[in-house]
């Protein structure tokens, strides 16, 4: 069974993570959830609260479900995977400093294997230095992260550039997963 690497950490966004986690399994892939350590991680619901009496300018995080990482970044090898799915939430802000995560991300990218990224996942793509000269999308508040990584930011549901497909937020999960699965099938 082909394997997909799904890196995450605490505060990974629940819908960014669970929709692809289950959808990839339905399509016949083994999803290896990876973290700085192999352990349970906390997901969050990452959304601007509706109908707030005092408006919020930033997203609020509420606790979500747990998800277990069965692989530590240090043990992940790019050759073992058919592709990679990077979810968003706050986790990428912290795990982008992990050199083992950046190593395996580069290995998968350099092999030309499909990489999908949604929302704040762009922070990992930028830290791994694999988006220079590419066109990508991400949540609007991370457009600067894309540009700092040398990419051109585009505000649309999904963008494919070479082996990388990106989406803005979990609201774009359906077109993102359709495209990612097509890329994996090629």
Image (cartoon, helix red, strand yellow):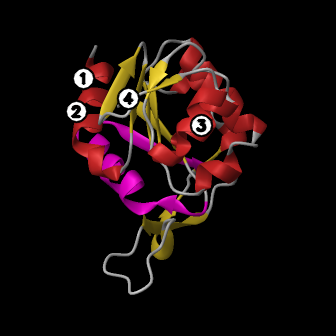
Whether 160 is among the magenta residues is: no
How packed mark 2 is, by other alpha carbons closer than 10 Å (few <14, some 14-19, many 20 or more), is: few
Q: Residue at x 58, y 24 (%)?
A: 78
What span is in magenta?
Answer: 10-35
How packed mark 3 is, by other alpha carbons closer than 10 Å (few <14, some 14-19, many 20 or more), is: some
What SS does tag 1 mark?
Answer: helix
* Residue hosting label 4: 2
Q: Nearer the viewer, mark 2 or mark 4?
A: 2
What is the distance, in whole Å, between disc 1 and disc 4 at their CAs? 14 Å
What SS does tag 4 mark?
Answer: loop
Q: Residue at x 47, y 73 (%)?
A: 56
**Which mark identifies residue 144?**
3
- Residue 43 left/right relative to 2: right
What SS does tag 2 mark?
Answer: helix
* Residue hosting label 2: 178
What is the distance, in whole Å, between disc 2 and disc 4 at their CAs? 17 Å
């Amino acid at each position: 069974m082909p394997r997909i690497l799904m890196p995450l950490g605490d505060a990974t966004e629940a819908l960014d993570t669970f929709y692809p986690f289950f959808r990839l399994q339905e399509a016949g892939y083994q999803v290896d959830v990876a973290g700085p350590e192999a352990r349970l991680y906390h997901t969050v619901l990452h959304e601007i609260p509706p109908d707030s009496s005092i408006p919020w300018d930033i997203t609020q995080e509420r606790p979500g479900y747990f998800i277990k990482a069965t692989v530590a970044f240090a043990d992940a090898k790019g050759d073992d995977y058919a592709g990679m799915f990077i979810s968003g939430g706050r986790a990428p802000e912290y795990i982008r400093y992990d050199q083992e995560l950046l190593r395996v991300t580069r290995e998968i990218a350099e092999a030309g294997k499909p990489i999908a990224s949604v929302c704040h996942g762009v922070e990992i793509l930028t830290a791994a230095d694999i988006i220079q000269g590419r066109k990508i999308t991400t949540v609007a508040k991370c457009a600067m992260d894309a540009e700092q990584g040398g990419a051109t930011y585009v505000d649309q549901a999904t963008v494919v550039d070479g082996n990388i497909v990106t989406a803005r937020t979990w609201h774009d999960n359906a077109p993102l997963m359709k495209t990612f699965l097509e890329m994996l099938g090629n």
